[in-house]
Amino acid sequence: MKLISLTSLTTKIFLTLCVVAVLLVSVSLFAQNKEKRIEYLDAFYAYIKGTDATISDEVLEQYIYDFHLEFYKKSRNDEFAWRAGMQKYREELNKGLASYNDDNILYRSVTDVEVEEYDFDKNGFPVSISDNAYLSIVSARHRGAPKGSKMMTDVGLKFPNFGEYNFLVMDSEKANSFIKSRSRQNNAVLGARIDRNVNIHIYFKIAPFDMPEYISFAQRSSKIYPVMGIIDRIEVFDGNTKLGNLIISK
């Protein structure tokens, strides 16, 4: 039998614990950094689960329309087939809600804004975003739905401090090149037009559904499923080129 000194054993235990600790930290950081573009189903689940909403027949019909359109079109007017389908898809929706967890997800949503004229004192472009603005997350089904269709409920995604992110820092040389690259065909009267439209990628966590800002938003949102996000950062892109991040500037 090989004897192992207490010092040697303690050292081995210590090293093992260090390795385990490093692995746990790595796993934790990986989980915290999971990012994905938010889809309609993510937001739909977040709303139903976050508000503890009853899955009414109306909500279930919306779900079937969005995710099982062929069945919807085939069976909506056949009460026997529809009743059986409602039971099947209610179970499916309940199962999806039970497995939905956004604790470690940083969602991303993409939209467009315009940069204003360059501020030579602050070295950057001001950006104006209304605090009342929200993004509409549209189901793929809705894009092809006929005008006036009953099944047209989208998700409204709002950020309580969206308007505070109002400045894109950029040195004047880079800004000059950007503006030159955005000059469009000359107009005989107004001269060259500058395309100031840029993409912003908003990274956020789903906000608690009991926060006062959410309650206020929900009370004004009768035709959408309201969801609110807490902003982590906003990245600005010109095509595939990252220009920087929007910051809060006083």
Image (cartoon, grey):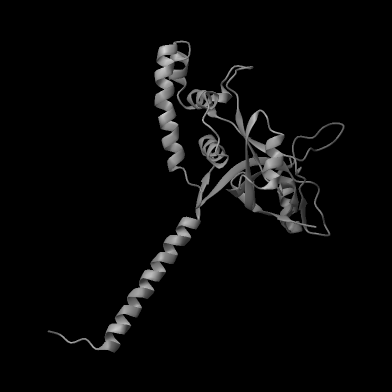
Answer above or below: position of 18 versus 86: below
- Quadrant (top left, top right, bottom left, bottom right) of the C terminus: bottom right
Q: Residue at x 60, y 24 (%)?
A: 152
Residue 20 sits in which quadrant? bottom left
Please identify the residue farthest to the top as the structure is shown.
Answer: 78
The answer to whether residue 37 shows anywhere in this view is: yes
Image spot of residue 92 (x, y percent): 41, 31
> Where is residue 201 shown, x and y percent of the image?
61, 46
Identify the residue shown where x is 42% and y is 27%: 89
Q: Is residue 197 visible?
A: no
Task: Indicate the quadrant where residue 79 lies.
Answer: top left
The foreground one among 110 and 213 is 213
> Can you say whether 129 is above or below 122 in the image?
above
Location of residue 150 by image quarter: top right
Q: Residue at x 57, y 21 (%)?
A: 151
Q: Position of residue 185 (x, y in %)?
A: 76, 34
Residue at figure coordinates x 85%, y 31% from the top left: 188
